Image (tube, rainbow, N blue to C red):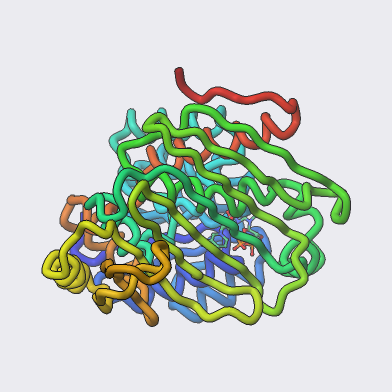
């Protein structure tokens, strides 16, 4: 492994362009090759980051010795570049989410990677968001008591499935769905917050009233093996002001978290954890300090208890502004130092688990039955 990672990027669309720029700007990595069947995309990016352009990723893999390959092709097209990279001897792969659109593809990919000892990351970028890091901390420390219920909505503006990929939008979204494109993120976030819990069973509905070529939405209940139930919903037919609407509400036996991550209209972004009322103020302050060490600036306060009509006080943690950790930096560090970094980088195993959940959602919506993932 070189001191400066030699990176190749496959698929130079929206995300592949971002990755190419991020890795080319980083002092510890250099993008040496980019591949896309659309020649001008590959050529333009190659010029921008001073790399070599290829229209065929197999040629790129045979000609260039790469430390890291980024796979950023459309959702159903990750397997071929991924397995070809493994076979070419690449030791680290950063695959865009979802890892795959079928469990069979995901299994084949992870079997090949495990056999060859390849380090696999899946770009579940929400894990780098400081408000999400705060959520994980509060849940894992038991500050809202035992988690019992959660509700997450991740919706896109209708412009995404109709226009985001230009003329290719209908074809692109027909090969995917809101389950694969959006609920893969949500499934991973929930697994991460609730670690080590896993989803046992799924019940879901979907509909095709507006888009027809791909489901308008999926709305699903996930039943977790620690007793938690979560409702997860993702739409592609929203007429909203923003591109994305993202809302997370997690309920514990003794408190809760509301995270207005990306409002669609009229609400302000924000994060608040209402803690177990038995937690004294010193411990509330300590939790804020601990979050500070994770890079999260949270305000700790004792407020009158709204759940008891203002009688007594309880602690809250509140974040109004937050940034993200630099994912590119974390991936590079993990590869160069051969260690897992905080905040627990999303691995191929995480990608595979998310594929299982997403596929159970799709199957349940198609059959109308509860689908079991594990006994
Ligand atoms: N992590 C995130 O938050 C996030 C956000 C958006 C999209 N994504 C994911 O990133 C991936 C790419 O999405 P996008 O919006 O950039 O798509 P895109 O269509 O803009 O880009 C994909 C590119 O891959 C190219 N391509 C297709 N087949 C190829 C092949 N065989 N070899 C090389 N290139 C090939 C296409 O020509 C296109 O340029 C998807 O899996 C998507 O779900 C992730």
Q: Quadrant of residue 147?
A: top left
Can you give x and y, in whole percent of width and height, for residue 77 in the image? 62, 46
Is residue 119 in view from this perspective? Answer: yes
Name the residue rendered at 33%, 28% in the picture: 115
Q: Quadrant of the C terminus?
A: top left
Residue sticking out furthest to the top? 375
Residue depicted at x 48% and y 43%: 82
At 43% from the left edge and 38% from the top edge, which residue is drawn?
228
Q: Height in image: 235 above or below 113?
A: below
| Closest to the observer, 263 or 339 | 263
Give the x, y percent position of residue 33: 45, 64
Q: Which quarter of the frame holds ligand 1?
A: bottom right
Query: Residue, x 73% and y 55% (percent of image)?
Result: 172
Q: Is residue 350 above or below residue 172?
A: above
Asked whether residue 297 is in view, the answer is: no
Left of 275 or right of it: where is 205?
Answer: right
Front in this rendered view, residue 66 or 104: 104
- In the rendered image, which quarter contains the N terminus? bottom left
Q: Position of residue 225 (x, y in %)?
A: 40, 29
When asked about the image quadrant of residue 194, the answer is: top left
Left or right placement of residue 361 versus residue 7 in this view: right
Q: Decide if residue 211 is on the left or right side of residue 142.
A: right
Of residues 317 and 40, the one nearer the viewer is 317
Q: Image quarter for residue 324?
A: bottom left
Q: How many marks?
A: 0
Image coordinates for residue 283, horizontal then vertical, percent: 14, 64
């Amino acid at each position: 492994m070189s001191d400066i990672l030699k990176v190749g990027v496959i698929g130079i669309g929206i995300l592949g362009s971002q990755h190419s720029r991020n890795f080319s700007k980083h002092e510890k990595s250099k993008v040496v090759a980019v591949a896309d069947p659309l020649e001008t995309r590959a050529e333009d990016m190659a010029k921008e980051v001073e790399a070599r352009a290829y229209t065929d990723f197999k040629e790129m893999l045979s000609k260039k010795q790469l430390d890291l390959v980024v796979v950023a092709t459309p959702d159903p097209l990750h397997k071929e570049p991924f397995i070809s990279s493994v076979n070419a001897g690449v030791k680290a792969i950063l695959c865009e989410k979802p890892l795959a659109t079928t469990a069979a593809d995901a299994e084949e990919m992870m079997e090949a990677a495990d056999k060859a000892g390849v380090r696999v990351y899946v770009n579940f970028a929400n894990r780098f968001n400081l408000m999400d890091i705060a959520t994980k901390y509060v849940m894992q420390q038991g500050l809202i008591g035992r988690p019992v219920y959660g509700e997450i909505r991740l919706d896109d503006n209708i412009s995404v499935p109709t226009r985001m990929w230009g003329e290719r939008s209908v074809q692109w979204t027909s090969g995917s769905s809101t389950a694969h494109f959006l609920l893969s993120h949500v499934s991973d976030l929930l697994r991460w917050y609730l670690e080590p819990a896993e989803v046992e069973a799924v019940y879901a509905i979907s509909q095709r009233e507006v888009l027809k070529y791909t489901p308008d939405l999926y709305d699903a209940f996930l039943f977790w093996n620690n007793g938690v139930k979560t409702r997860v919903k993702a739409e592609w037919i929203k007429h909203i002001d923003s591109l994305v609407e993202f809302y997370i509400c997690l309920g514990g036996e003794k408190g809760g978290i509301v995270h207005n991550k990306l409002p669609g209209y009229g609400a302000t972004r924000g994060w608040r954890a209402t803690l177990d009322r038995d937690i004294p103020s010193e411990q509330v302050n300590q939790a804020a300090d601990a979050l500070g060490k994770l890079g999260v600036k949270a305000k700790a306060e004792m407020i009158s208890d709204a759940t008891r009509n203002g009688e007594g006080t309880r602690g809250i943690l509140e974040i109004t502004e937050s940034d993200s950790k630099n994912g590119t930096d974390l991936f590079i560090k993990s590869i160069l130092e051969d260690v897992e970094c905080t905040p627990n980088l999303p691995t191929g195993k995480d990608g595979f688990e998310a594929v299982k959940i997403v596929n159970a959602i799709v199957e349940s919506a198609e059959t109308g039955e509860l689908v079991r993932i594990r006994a």
